[in-house]
Amino acid sequence: MTAPETISTSSPRRLTWARRRRSAAQFWQQYRRNRGGMFGLVVLLLFVATALLAPWIVGQDALSVTRPPGAPLQGPSQAFLLGTDRSGRSVLDLIIWGSRVSLTVGFWATFISITFGALLGIAAGHFHGWISTVIMRVTDWFLVMPSLVLGVALAAVLGRSLTTIIIAIGVTAWPTTARLVRAQTLAVEARPYIERAHALGGGHWHVMSRHVLPNVMPIVLAQTTLMVGTAILTESTFAFLGLGDPTTASWGGTIQAARDVGAVSARMWWYILPPGIAIVLVVLAFTLCGRAIEGVLNPKLRERRS
Amino acid sequence: MAGPADTDLVPHSPEEGVRDRSGLYSTARYVGARLGGSLVSLFAVIVTSFFLFRIIPGDPVDAMTHGRPVSIEQKQQLRREFGLDDPLYQQFLDYLWGVVRLDFGQSFQFSRPVTELIGERLWPTLLLVGTAVAISALIGLTLGVNGAWRHGSTSDRVNTGLALTLWSVPSFWLGLILIVVFSSTLGWFPTSGMRTEGVSGWEAVPDVAHHMVLPVVTLVAVLYAQYLMIMRSSLLDEMGSDYIVTARAKGLRDALVRRRHAVPNALLPTVTLIFVNLGFVVFGSVLVETIFSWPGLGQLFYSGLNVPDLPLVQGLFVFFSAAVILMNLLADLLYPVIDPRVRP
């Protein structure tokens, strides 16, 4: 809407880019109207900034267990706004550092599962016959297995590290995406211009990458945003179950540590409350963003929710 | 518990079954196909459980005896007992034969058959999960219907926002907070367990109920959002339908259009989904049971995980997966019964 209409002169590439800029601007205009989505976006940017700046906000020694900056299990004070943990480290510093862990796991696990899900979903929708059957069988099988059981089992068997958690979440979370993408692929491939592409000699790869993929991307984008939230929630669960790397300061791990030292019966609210609130805020932010994107891309939902 | 709020969890679209409309024969075919699919899934799960726990790095005996002083003779004894020196195919066949007889071997931790342990711990879990699912379905469906009927209103916005927030809450953390507030501080509810020692007979009923309040509240808080969102969007879909317009045009009262026309149709997918979710919820109770020391399957799984007690974890893995498969099968079979439109 905002871009001028005078770009019709030069190459097709420039035209394409102008069209993309225009639709991006349009997307942003509609996204901005969703108040929940804007709230989520702001919270998200704050957390991403915190995670990126964490090494500068938190001193190098702040997370050392051997030379902690304070006495263990102290309540909030001037020096430690949220008190100290069991080894005398500032809980606030742990939370700030934990945002790195949560976002890292969230992004990588989502990247793995979305890549798997999108590729398998497109393949299952594009090819017919046995390829599709096999892929969908495997998808159904993964869908049926409680992903947390498989993840927990994987994490227990592979050892305790961040990579294990990323793999466990990534490998178990793809089936929903695969089903979604397959449905969308089937819808796209039913359209006449796909037949035209085939008639003009377009091969499988051409059709999948140039026609199906761009049309599937929006749905994948919305799904990605929603999935990062789920992945972060799952990560905290794994960390709480003691499957995470004990040396990294993740939010779930902090809650587990608090429980271990008896913070529950001692009512050390400053130890238990903050990591949980951080999890809720990040997961909610991703969920709100995902729903807002979904709303913009799906006009039917937009009418309803406005 | 980690399932996204509004994705498609119904694994088979019911339309797949609509091909042949020749009554009994097609019904039998539909049931047969679903049964066959479930058996294939079950077999896949059993195979997975075998390879997951035996092939992936590490000596099972080392894992089993982790942190305990054991002599070499004891280790060899264990290897014999678990058949670890047999060729792989032999181990696999033995395992399969065991599963068929519902024999998952001895728990390392409790020195008792895994099947016996599962049978013992099943009832507390069913009680907890059943109550929680029933309550959250009731709350979720009611709020979902109200939200959709008056969508965009303040109450709808507040309810949807609250549901999304609670859905983002880690259940284990919520449980801890509830304990801090209602047990440690106010002293209203017990912190853990299922019953007070020494209480038996009919007096045990209010006692168990008293112990159940906090775990059930925790589960309901994280569960009901899904039901709310599904019911809401499914009713919103129905509200645009022609038959609703017709019902209104006939001059029916608003409440009647809602109760007799819109809700019954919107309820169908929701009920199926609740059913399908039931299987997952059983596993979702691991965290809540652990927090509240509820003597159910979840807590058993957690304790097995920490040792690690491989036969126990393996048995529970198969059991949890089988529960999901069974619920999926039931949902698939029930769907045509409750929704005539997809009858095969």
Image (cartoon, rainbow, N blue to C red):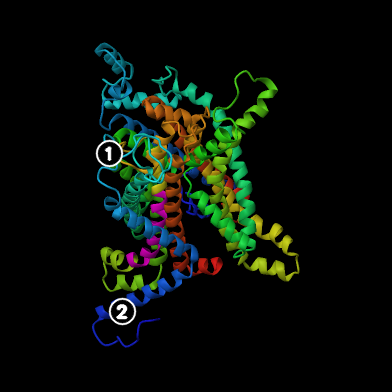
- Asked if labels 2 and 1 share a chain, the reply is yes
A81 to B288, vertically: above or below: below
The region drawn magenta spans A213-231
**Which disc, if any, is residue A64?**
1
Q: Is residue A306 magenta?
A: no
Locate residue B95: give its quadrant: top left
Which residue: 44% across, 43% down? Answer: A144
> Which of B101 and A28 lies nearest the eye of the viewer?
A28
Residue A269: x %, y % from top left: 48, 40
Which residue: 55% across, 33% down? Answer: B184
A140 to A305, vertically: above or below: above
Q: What residue type is labelled 1?
A: Ser
**Which disc, if any, is residue A275?**
none
Residue B126: x %, y % from top left: 57, 33
**Which disc, if any, is residue A18?**
2
Residue B31: x %, y % from top left: 53, 43
Q: Which amino acid does label 2 sit on?
A: Ala
Which residue: 61% across, 38% down? Answer: B131
- Looking at the image, is mark 2 or mark 1 earlier in the sequence? 2
Task: Output the chain of dot 2.
Answer: A
Q: What element carries label 2?
A: helix
